[in-house]
Image: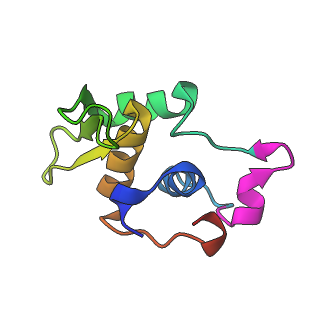
Amino acid sequence: MKTSELQGAALDWAVAKCEGATETAPQKFYGWKGALFGYSTNWSQGGPIIEREKLVIAPSNHWGSPRAWYANTTGRNKFHVLYGLTPLIAAMRCYVTSKLGDEVEIPKELK
């Protein structure tokens, strides 16, 4: 799946994989009360990644569309710019792209 299209559980799963989660099978990714990881919706989980990776987030010129925000990497050999409806979605897509590339194999249960 294209990293630029990841959202929801699929995006959170990919971020967990980048963070070194060893239990990345979908049945172990979710606890009995729901998602264990909410990187793309919870600032307490996604925020530290943004800070650590020095991602830049800003509003784009596409207000009201799925490209309302963008995030990019800084100080890297390869520059990545990804968009999202929210700052966290844009940032997490950018992070995943910087670590795993433009396409990611996502378990079919999360698509």
Q: Which residues are magenta?
A: 24-34
Q: In this view, which residue lies farthest toward the right?
A: 32
Residue 45 colored in magenta in the image = no
Left or right for 96, reference 107: left
Query: Looking at this view, is 75 or 64 the one in front?
Result: 64
Decide: is 89 above or below 1: above
At 24% across and 27% down in the image, what residue appears? Answer: 58
> Picture quarter containing residue 71?
top left
Q: Is residue 7 above or below residue 43?
A: below
- How many numbered markers are drawn? 0
* Residue plotted at (87% across, 49% down): 32
Q: Measuring from the top left, give residue 34's x and y in whole percent.
A: 77, 45
What is the x, y in percent for residue 101? Answer: 31, 64
What x and y, as percent, mark residue 23?
69, 61
x 33%, y 56%: residue: 4
Q: Nearer the viewer, residue 15 or 84?
A: 84
Q: Quadrant of the C terminus?
A: bottom right
Instruction: Specify the farthest residue to the front.
Output: 64
- Residue 97, above or below 43: below
**Picture residue at 57% right of the left edge, 56% below the top:** 13
In reply to whether residue 30 is colored magenta, the answer given is yes
The quarter of the image holding the N terminus is bottom left
Give the colouring mode of the picture. Answer: rainbow
Relative to the observer, which residue lies in front, 8 or 92? 8
